[in-house]
Amino acid sequence: MNTPTADATPTNGRPWGDLTRLREETKTPEGCKVEIAEELITVAPPLDNNHNVITHRVQRLLYTVIPDDWGIFQTVGTAVPPCHSLFVPDLAVAPEAVLESEPGNYIPAAAAELVVEVTSKNNANHDRIKKAEIYAKARVPLYLLIDRHAPGGPTTPLYGEPRHDVYRVLQAAPFGEPLHLPAPFDMDLDTKVFPANDRA
């Protein structure tokens, strides 16, 4: 569902004001995710079980390598004010101090060290194209896309080195092959632990 939104004029020193309030006031069924992409509100339905299992397994692996003062967050918004966008990635890795210093329920996307999105049937192109563009504009260092619905079969591209609105593909691993996350993570992600996608 896409809904036209209010003007994104900054209010009280915070980015967008009315736009953020409209997002918070959007009435949606429990479990749905509300995001803003270039002043359009999008509402995603609750996630399926395979989606949740993948997110959980990636989170568990990441906790073995991140510093003690970083966190892995599933419900924090990542704001990109110049693009009038606010996403809630499946996982956002950021220093805890960033969240403690920001009132509300979102942080600047640029403060995240890594964002992870897992595609669903209804949002796969959005994650591949629009979110990649906007995360690159925000200069998020690493964007991991777990693309369960890629045309050639499930795959896991890792994007990095953002320049303007474009990332470089650092690596892409089909499900079943390892994918290396570079520093500051320096770990191999075993995609064999991702469940099959036959019912998703």
Image: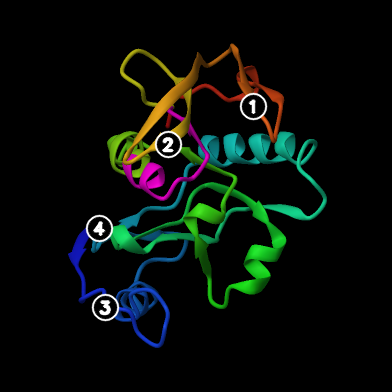
- Quickly name the residue at label 3: 9
- Quickly name the residue at label 4: 38
* C-alpha span from label 4 to label 3: 13 Å
Going by the numbered disc 1, the residue's amino acid type is Pro
Q: At 28% from the left edge and 35% from the top edge, which residue is drawn?
A: 125
Q: Which mark is residue 24?
A: none
Instruction: Judge left or right: residue 19 versus residue 60.
Output: left
Q: At 53% from the left edge and 16% from the top edge, which residue is drawn?
A: 175
**Residue 8 occupies quadrant:** bottom left
Mark 1 falls on what kind of element? loop
Marks 1 and 2: in contact by CB < 8 Å? no
Q: Which residues are magenta?
A: 133-147
* C-alpha span from label 2 to label 3: 27 Å
Marks 1 and 4: in contact by CB < 8 Å? no
Mark 4 falls on what kind of element? loop
Pick whichever of labels 4 and 1 is earlier in the sequence: 4
Q: Nearer the viewer, mark 2 or mark 4?
A: 2
Instruction: Judge left or right: residue 181 versus residue 152.
Output: right
Q: Nearer the viewer, mark 2 or mark 3?
A: 2
How busy is the neighbourhood of tag 3: few (under 14 within 10 Å), some, or many (20 plus)?
some
- Number of disc labels: 4
Going by the numbered disc 2, the residue's amino acid type is Pro
- Quickly name the residue at label 2: 162
Q: Residue 84 lies in magenta, yes or no?
A: no
* C-alpha span from label 4 to label 1: 30 Å
